């Protein structure tokens, strides 16, 4: 991992990025809500629960954001989550890919609720609704909704959430942040890993 020197400039870059990400997340939430309400889709009480899905996350800025939320929790709650996250990481190393029926629940999900809902990453915000995406290479990509979406709205529903501008905004923010911090590593982390694994970045007094 790259280790640029710590500085006030870097801290201000992180703060700038987190503010910018909050605005992008607001846009994601608004687009998702618009698409969901247009089709009467409600994500509630579903048996599939995608919080058991092992999604990977790839951005430094979302890593910072999630950990900002973790730091804001009361000590006991943070400690409980970190313990569960460490167990999830250990289980992942032991069993590898799990069948969906046995998949490990995200350590942030307690009694069906996300404990860092306001800080959850992009895929947690956009999952569930059929989507389309115009990739930077010009290709058109489509993705299905979740099983519960199909049950509620019909599997034949056309892609109704366009992720193109949302992905582009996040990619540009990530590019700029990495450039400012001199961070070049590729990231591929589960939520559990993001919660317990510290990236080798400049020491900032534990603020990450
Ligand atoms: S971060 Fe929250 S929404 Fe995302 S998988 Fe974990 S519990 Fe579910
Ligand atoms: S997005 Fe779909 S799979 Fe995930 S919890 Fe909501 S209804 Fe269930």
Image (tube, rainbow, N blue to C red):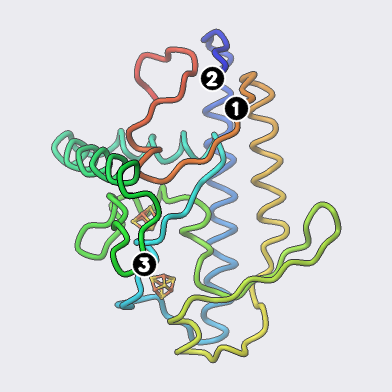
Q: Earlier in the sequence, mark 1 or mark 2?
A: 2
- In whole angstroms, how far apart are the C-alphas of marks 1 and 3? 30 Å
Q: Quarter-wise, where is residue 84 in the image? A: top left
Q: Say which residue appears at 27% left-offset and 57% top-offset.
A: 109
Q: Say which residue appears at 72% left-offset and 57% top-offset.
A: 165
Circle number at residue 1: 2
Q: Which of the pair 154/87 is nearer the observer?
A: 87
Question: Where ligand 2 lies, by quadrant?
Answer: bottom left
Q: Quadrant of the N terminus?
A: top right
Q: Residues within 10 Å of mark 3 (few under 14, many from 20)?
A: few
Marks 1/3 in contact by CB < 8 Å: the verdict is no
Quickly name the residue at label 1. 185
Q: Secondary structure at mark 2?
A: loop
- In whole angstroms, how far apart are the C-alphas of marks 2 and 3? 32 Å
Compared to 55, does 41 lie above or below? below
Q: Which of the pair 129/22 is nearer the observer?
A: 129
Marks 1/2 in contact by CB < 8 Å: the verdict is yes
Q: Is residue 104 left or right of residue 208?
A: left
Residue furthest to the front in view is: 95
- In whole angstroms, how far apart are the C-alphas of marks 1 and 2? 6 Å
Quickly name the residue at label 3. 100
Q: Earlier in the sequence, mark 2 or mark 3?
A: 2
Residue 205: percent from left, percent from top: 36, 14
């Amino acid at each position: 991992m790259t280790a640029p020197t710590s500085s006030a400039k870097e801290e201000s870059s992180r703060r700038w990025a987190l503010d910018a990400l909050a605005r992008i997340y607001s846009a994601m939430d608004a687009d998702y809500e618009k698409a969901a309400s247009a089709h009467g889709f409600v994500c509630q009480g579903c048996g599939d629960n995608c919080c058991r899905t092992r999604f990977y996350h790839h951005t430094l800025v979302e890593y910072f954001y999630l950990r900002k939320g973790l730091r804001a929790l009361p000590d006991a709650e943070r400690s409980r989550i970190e313990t569960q996250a460490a167990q999830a990481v250990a289980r992942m190393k032991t069993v590898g890919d799990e069948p969906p029926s046995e998949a490990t629940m995200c350590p942030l999900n307690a009694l069906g609720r996300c404990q860092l809902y306001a800080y959850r990453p992009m895929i947690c915000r956009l999952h569930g609704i059929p989507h389309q995406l115009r990739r930077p290479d010009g290709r058109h990509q489509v993705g299905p909704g979740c099983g519960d979406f199909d049950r509620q709205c019909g599997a034949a529903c056309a892609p109704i959430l366009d992720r193109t501008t949302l992905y582009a905004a996040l990619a540009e923010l990530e590019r700029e942040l990495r450039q400012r911090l001199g961070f070049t590593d590729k990231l591929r982390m589960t939520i559990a890993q993001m919660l317990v694994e510290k990236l080798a970045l400049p020491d900032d007094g534990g603020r990450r």
